[in-house]
Image (cartoon, grey):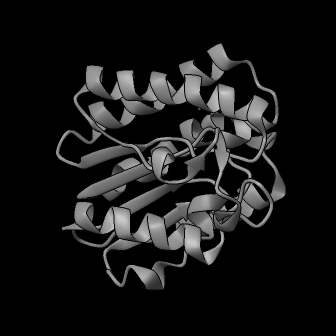
Amino acid sequence: MDENRIISQPEHWHDRYSFFQTLGSSQDCIVFLGDSLTEWFDYSMLPDPRILNYGISGDTTEGVVLRAEQIIPLKPAGLFLMIGINDLLKGFDIAEIKENYRQIVQIFATHLPLANFSVYSILPTSDMEINAKVAEMNAFISQLAAEMGIEYLDLHSRFIQRRAILPELTNDGVHLTRAGYEIWTNFVKDYLK
C-alpha cells in the first residue's frame, strides 16, 4: 500500500479509517461502502443488524482503493458500493476515475468471490455539466459490472428528472433529503433479502 496516498487523505477520512480498524467482523455482515451519501444514510430505516456503514464523507475512488484492505478480512455476505461523485465534483480526470473504479471492482471480485457484490449507479446532481459526466461514468460502471459478472443497481433513474436530480430529493444539489433516502431504502430492501 502506498503510505503517501494514505497520508494525503483528509482528516475526516483518517478518523473514519481509524475507527474502521477497531471494528470486528460480524457473521454474514453486509457492507455499505462509499462517501457521504453512504455515511449519512439513516440505517435505522433498514433495521438489519448485519449492515456495517463504511461510508466516509468526501471519499473518492482512490480512497476506496486504499480502504479495500479493511473490507476483505470482513468476508461480507453482501457488499454495496456507491462511489465517484466526489471525483467528478473535484474535477478529477475521468480516465483516472474509471481506472480506480475498475481496480476497486477487480479487488473485490477477486478477493470476495462469495460475496453478493453490487455496484450502484452514481446519483445525479443539480449541475447539468456534472450530470453529463455522471452519465458517462454510469455507462462505464454498468458495462464493467456486466463484464465482471456483478450486479449493477440503477438508482440514478429514480432520482432524475429533466437531466437533474429532483429538487425534493436533495438539500444542496448533491446530498439527499429524507425523501431521497426513503427511495434508496425501498430500492435496496429487495436486495437485502
**In front here: 173 or 152?**
173
Q: Is residue 131 above or below residue 191?
A: above
Q: Residue at x 37, y 72 (%)?
A: 51
Residue 88 shows up from this direction: yes
Q: Is residue 31 above or below residue 148?
A: below
Which x, y percent locates residue 43?
47, 78
Please state if 155 lies on the left or on the right of 85 as rendered: left
Please state if 72 lies on the left or on the right of 16 as rendered: left
- In the rendered image, the quadrant that contains the N terminus is top right
How many marks on residues? 0
Quarter residue 7 falls in = top right
- In the rendered image, the quadrant that contains the C terminus is bottom left
Which x, y percent locates residue 107?
39, 31
Q: Residue at x 74, y 51 (%)?
A: 58
As drawn, the residue found furthest toward the front would be 162
Which x, y percent locates residue 176?
65, 65
Residue 5 shows up from this direction: no
Quarter residue 38 falls in = bottom right
Q: Is residue 177 above or below residue 98?
A: below
